[in-house]
Structure formats: structure tokens, C-alpha cells
Amino acid sequence: MAETKTLQEILLTLGEKPLNVNVSLPGIKGENGQDGRNGADGLSAYDIAQLNGFTGTQQEWLESLKAGAVADEARTMLLNGNVWCKSNSIADVLAAVISNLGKAFPRTEFKPLTVPTVLQGQRVITVEGEPHYFVKVGGMETQFEIGDNGTGSISIEPLGVDDVHLTYHNFIGEKVGETVISGGHEDTRTPDESYEENGVKYALFGRKLEINVVNFNGDYEHNFILLGKWPKDSIDSVMIKASRPTTLYTGAFNGRRYTFKDVVGSGIGNIPVLVDNPKNVTFINNDAYSQPVKIGNIEYGTANVKFETSRIEWSDSEHKYVNTGSSIDHL
């Protein structure tokens, strides 16, 4: 082996197949080997990007690399599959995929919303649920997200006599649950008759109709009906109650009974309508009503107000309800 060169080829025979093995012997210099043939050039990274849908120039592609690679579709797929993904960056998408390895996809389980006992007057509530799901409070547009640790804080109007409705939503906004925070009892009176429609609670005490509208959940197709199920001859006055900002849809839709007509189709006439907190009640209207409505509050009394525009709300300066929307015609 003394004459063996630095790059020594040893031929080993395994059965009938020869196996060429190159071994290096330290300290001994061998001859240069024979050059191989030139291979074909492969695709560049830019070429591969184009094959996968990139339509910009090479410079635009380089700029996109500087900005960081993203995976919008992958993130959307993860969120739709109920797997949380912080952003569309490649790193966050990969982290989300890895976190769900070995688990079912789409993921069906999630932590339910848990709400503690809420005290009268309380306005900030700590809830528990699925991280990054969110909670909405009835009558409010704000979304309250649950944090990484599974807890979150929601804000409500100070809890009073009215129930507070919460809805629970997943990453893409789908409602997956709901719960009610019960308000206190206003009094122990028992109405002669009562019922509920579109979230509005009607209670008739003698000839006085009291309406709690704070949880109204209707729309133009299911509009607010002032006198509920009663004819106007059964009612002397109406009190509308709302402990927090509430929007009522008034008017009519495809033959639906008009807001200010009774169960037999007669107009409410001169029945006074008082609102306990008029700043909290705004009317969104879709049909001009030819007769004025006597509406106001206890402090300033009622005024004749025509519901002839798309919005009617309380004016602090005029101490009455005024038309502030655009003009509308009969449908």
C-alpha cells in the first residue's frame, strides 16, 4: 500500500456487482481526477415563483422578499378550520400548523364562554373562553377579544334592571354561543297582561302600557309595534323604557302592520307616548306617517312629531323628538 496515491480507488466485489469506494489516505498526494460533463442549468428561485403564480417583475419579487413572505390563503384555511393563526407570515402559519399536528382538522372543539356572577351597577366583567374568540354585547358594535390566556374583559352599561345579551364568536366571526346576564327586578308588580315580541317586553297595567325596548332585535321586516297586541281603545298611555342606547325600526315592510297602528289597523290617535330616557331611544324609519305622534318625556311632556324622515331622535336643545334623517315617501 506504500505506492497508493492520495485518492485511491478500491474495487470491492459484492456478488457480481462491483462497488467503487473512494478513500483518502492522509499525507499522500494523488493525481487530479477527470472532470465530469456540465449539467443543465436549473430553475432560478424567481422562475419557481412565477410557476407558482407570481406575476410581478424580478425586482418586484426581490422587494417582496424584503417585506417578508406571506401565506394569506393558508392563514384563511387555518382560521376557517378553527385553528388560530396570528398573522399571514410564513413563521406564524408554520407555528399554527405545528401546534395542530396530530389533531383533527378542521378542529371542532373550543372552550365555551364562561361569565361570572355580575353585580348590580357593575360595568366591567372578566370572562373566560377560547383564546382569540370574541364577545359582542347586545346593542353595541364593539368586539371584546379573549386573550392568549383564555380570559378577557368586556364593558357594559352599569347593570340595572335589564338583561344584557352576549354573543360568542369564533375567529371568522361566526356565532357559536350566547348567554344572558340577568338584570335586577324593577318591582314586584304583576301586569294584567304581558307578552314579548322581537325582544320587546310589553306589560299592561290597567290601561297603562309599559314597554321595555332595550333588547329589541327586530328590523324593517320585523319592525317595532307600539301598542303590541292591543287595540287603542284598551290603552290610555304608553311608557317606553330603555336603560341604554337602543334603536327601534319603525314603519312598515311588505304588508307588515305599521308601527303606529293598533292590532285592528287604526291609528293610535292622541295616545301620549312617554320615553323614560329619550336620549337612549332613536327611531330609524322607512315610511312617512301622515299623522303626528304625541311623544316626549315626563319632564317636558309630549309634542306632536311627524315621523316623515329616515331618522327621529331626541334634541336636548329643543326638548323634543325631531326629524334628523332624509326625506322618505310612502312605500
Image (tube, grey):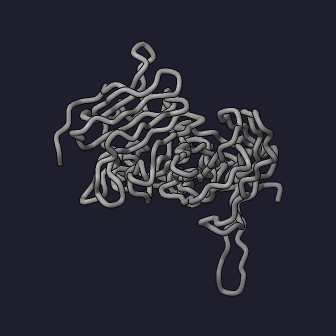
Tally the numbered discs.
Answer: 0
Task: Indicate left or right for 168 with 172 as reference.
Answer: right
Image point 58% across, 39% down: which residue?
A: 143
Residue 260 locus on image (x, y percent)? 33, 46
* Residue 322 in sight: yes
Image quadrant holding the N terminus, namely bottom right
Residue 25 locus on image (x, y percent)? 80, 52
Q: Is 159 rendered above or below residue 177? A: above
Residue occupying the far top of the picture: 317
Image point 74% across, 42% down: which residue?
A: 148
* Residue 41 in sight: no
Q: Is 298 rendered above or below residue 246? A: above
Residue 298 locus on image (x, y percent)? 52, 27
Image point 32% across, 30% down: which residue?
A: 305
Residue occupying the far bottom of the picture: 15
Residue 313 locus on image (x, y percent)? 39, 28
Name the residue nearer the viewer: 84 or 30.
Answer: 84
Q: Is 82 rendered above or below residue 209? A: below
Corner quadrant of residue 214? top right
Task: Indicate left or right for 27 with 38 as reference.
Answer: right
